[in-house]
Amino acid sequence: MRRMIPVVSIALAVLVAGCGTDSESPTDSPARATSAADPVTTIKEGMGRGLSGTVTMEASVKIGQAAMELTGKMDPAAKVLTVVTTAPEEMEARLIGDAAYIKAESLGSDKPWMKIDLTKLRPESPLRQSFDLQSQTGLVGGIVTAEKVGASSYKGTADLEKAVQAASDDGGMREGLESTAKLAKDPKAIPFEATVDAEGRVTSLSYTIATKSLGDLVTELRMSGFGEKVTATAPPAGETEDASADMYEFL
């Protein structure tokens, strides 16, 4: 179980690791807002626009010889999320309201699925924060420079310290960004590339963080399926085990 929690937390957090959304949704039409905005604003608003409804995300994270690959679909309004990872181990997670279901061999349970009531987790629990779709923030919140380099492509730099300031202080996201900033050789100049579609939504984001001792941390996100219906069903009761009181203490 101790090996599984980092996998789950990272997998869920990476779906929105590059994402920073404003509390207010853009009121202009996508085309008008994008054409009038500077590149930094275009990307920040484009990420918020892309995450304002249902979306599918594919992500890969590599550092040194280690890698994680995942696919996720989420509906923030309905509080529905599904995630599947293939590396470093196979894992599946589903969120339905405040009920999270996780399936992984490292659970060490007689039943394949564990059910976790998110309302029972500590407010500062990283796992709880990972499932809090609306409060996530990340690299986009720290973007300081950007330029348009193609019809729909941009590149620029982000400041991890500014991203920390922009992050929610609920749960573990801010702490996670602070830890990453400490690992980075130059946390104030993280290079990134992004693409924005005709509707003003970010469709891809990639960035590389050169670390002091672990090598390059390379993250690639691809967003699609905007507006498509996202559903999740609870696993059969006979295949599900409720998390124990001791487990909640650990989580």
Image (cartoon, helix red, strand yellow):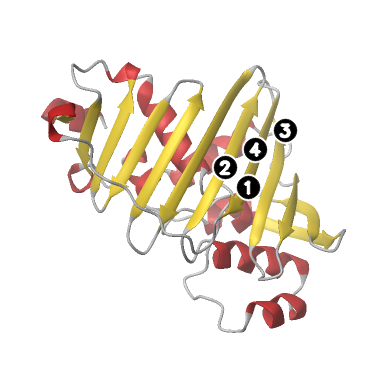
Label 4 environment density (alpha carbons within 10 Å; few <14, some 14–19, many ≥20)? many
Q: Kindly identify which residue carries mark 4.
A: 219
Question: Mark 3 is on which residue type?
Answer: Lys
Image quadrant where residue 29 sits: bottom right
Inter-mark Cα distance, 3 to 4 = 16 Å
Q: Residue 58 shows which numbered tag?
A: 2
N-term mark: 1 or 3: 3
Of the residues under marks 2 and 4, which one precedes in the sequence? Answer: 2
Please tell me which residue lies in front, 36 or 74.
74
Q: Which of the marked residues, 3 or 4, is nearer the chain's N terminus?
A: 3
Image vertical order of residue 195 relative to residue 38, above or below: above
* Contact (Cβ within 8 Å) of mark 3 with mark 2: no
* Residue annotated with mark 3: 185
Of helix, strand and loop, which one carries label 4?
strand
Marks 3 and 4 close (CB-CB < 8 Å): no
Residue 200 lies in quadrant: bottom right
The answer to whether the residues at label 2 and label 4 have Cβ atoms under 8 Å apart is no
Q: Position of residue 179 (x, y in %)?
A: 54, 35
Q: Where does the image place residue 185, in percent across and percent down from the top left?
A: 72, 33
The residue tagged with tag 1: helix, strand or loop? strand
Which amino acid type corresponds to the residue marked 4 in the rendered image? Thr
- Which dot, 3 or 2, sits closer to the camera? 2
Q: Nearer the viewer, mark 1 or mark 3?
A: 1
Q: CA distance from mark 4 to mark 1?
A: 10 Å
Above/below status of 250 relative to 80: above
Q: Is residue 233 left or right of residue 133?
A: left
The amino acid pointed to by label 1 is Arg
| Image depth: mark 3 or mark 4 in front | 4
Q: CA distance from mark 3 to mark 2?
A: 27 Å
Question: Residue 222 shows which numbered tag?
Answer: 1
Is 91 placed above or below 137 here? above
